[in-house]
Structures are given as C-alpha cells and as structure tokens.
Image: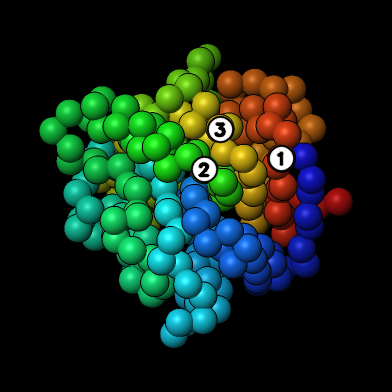
Amino acid sequence: MTIDRFQTEADLSAALAARVLETIVTRPRTVLGLPTGRTPLGLYRELRERSGGDRIDWSQVRTFNLDEFAGLGPAHPASYRSFMQAELFDHVSLVPEHIGFLNGTAPDLVAECRQYDDAIARAGGIDLQVLGIGANGHIGFNEPADGLRAETHVAVLTRPTREANAHRFDHDWAQVPERALSMGMATILGAREIILIATGQEKAAAVQGMIEGLITTRLPASLLQVHPSVTVMVDREAWPR
Ligand code: PGA
C-alpha cells in the first residue's frame, strides 16, 4: 500500500481529480469504478470543474458504481444513481450507455448482481477503482462479518451504516433501506488499480486497521493489503502521524 497524506481535504480532492483525469487522457477507454458518499464530493466537484465545456473527453470512458440501495430506482432522489447524476454524470461528456449501475428495483436482484459482474468482465475489468471507507471498515456495502461475499450481491446493512446514510433520508436512519446491492470483494480486488480515500477523524481507527492491522473480514478494507496496487489518500485527521 502506498500512503499519500494531504494537509487538507481540498488538496486530496485536487490531487485525486488530477490523477483520474490523467488516466482518462492517457487511456480514453478507461473503465472507472466509482464510490458515493461524502468523501468523494470534492473529487466530483473537481472533475466537474476541470472537465467543463469540452476540455476533457469522457465519451469513451466506462463507469461502474460500487453499490445501490435495494428498492430504490434510478430516479429516486435518495438513490446513489441520483447522487452520481447530480455530482458527476450530468456534467461531463460521459455517454449514458457507458454508465454501469446496479438497479435497486430490478425484478430479480440476484440476477441483477450476476449481470453486473458479467458487464464488468465484458468491459475488460475495472482499470481504476476509487473507494471510500466506512467508519466500521466497510468498502462498498461489504460490512464487517465472519465471512464476506466475493461477487456482487445483496447485502444486509448494519445499523451504523444506515445511520451514516440517514442524511439522504430526512435524517431518519429507519428510512434507510435494510438491504443494498454491492460489488463483492473479488469484484473490487479485481480492479487493476485501487485508490482509497479517507478524511476526518471518524475514519482514523478504520484507516489504521486497514493499513497496520491483520487482514480480517471484521474490517473488510484490510483485505486491500493483498492487492498489488493500492494507494490510500488521507488527510491529517484520518491518518494523524
Ligand atoms: P462517506 O462514506 O464518504 O460518506 O464517509 C464512505 C463509505 O461508507 O464507504
């Protein structure tokens, strides 16, 4: 793991956006894996600003997002698809057909997950996967447990994760769906390159466990230690060294 520590969240977001855009310019057919959440808001702001007009050509880029709530369709205001439309997709020259997204209202969620892994494989796999980390060490919706799923699957959300998402549901954690669709550990670890971003003191314990702790399914992000190309981008609060 390579650790890049930044003075501020804004510095981190600017450096990551530069890296993502450099990847796109160098390899126009890049396949990106993308996260939602509060941490990547600065990344998406930077990508919008730097891609504006026709400055960066996204037309051959493909994207696959990590996860989506079960029961929420793409147009639902609290869906992760809506978040991505508002934060990035509506502002860059990405072709709608190149956006890979789990549909939380698919009639058969298990089939939806299987088709998602197939679509990632057909696209040639993910070149660059950007990840956030939960305060409990989850990545995507791979929550701490005695065992983890390899493939994209229907996940049961823990109470802390539902609470962390309450701001999208009238600040009422009970309204947060109990289940979500999520890339699995093999889907994530299959990416050629992974960049995990973490900011704020509330992530410090999970970040320390991920970097220095034993590999354990009780801290899913620790499995990233087995991947040959992981960069962890942190601010001072998340990695106070
Ligand atoms: P956050 O979520 O960026 O909103 O903290 C990260 C995550 O839970 O993966």
The crowding category of the residue bearing disc 2, from other C-alpha atoms within 10 Å (few below 14, some 14 to 19, many at least 20), is many
Looking at the picture, tell me which residue is in the foreground, 133 or 153.
Answer: 153
Residue under the point 39% across and 37% down? 122
Looking at the picture, tell me which residue is in the foreground, 179 or 152.
Answer: 152
Residue under the point 58% across and 21% down? 217
Under 8 Å from ligand 1: the CB of mark 3?
A: no
Looking at the image, how many numbered discs can be counted on the residues?
3
Q: Secondary structure at mark 2?
A: loop
Q: Which residue is mark 2?
A: 126
Q: Which residue is mark 3?
A: 190
Q: Are marks 3 and 2 in contact (CB under 8 Å)?
A: yes
Q: Which residue is mark 1?
A: 229
Examine the rendered structure and indicate whether residue 141 appears above or below residue 31.
above
Which residue in the rendered view is the most extreme toward the left?
Answer: 107
Examine the rendered structure and indicate whether residue 51 appears above or below residue 173.
below
**N-term-proximal mark, 1 vs 2:** 2
**N-term-proximal mark, 3 vs 2:** 2
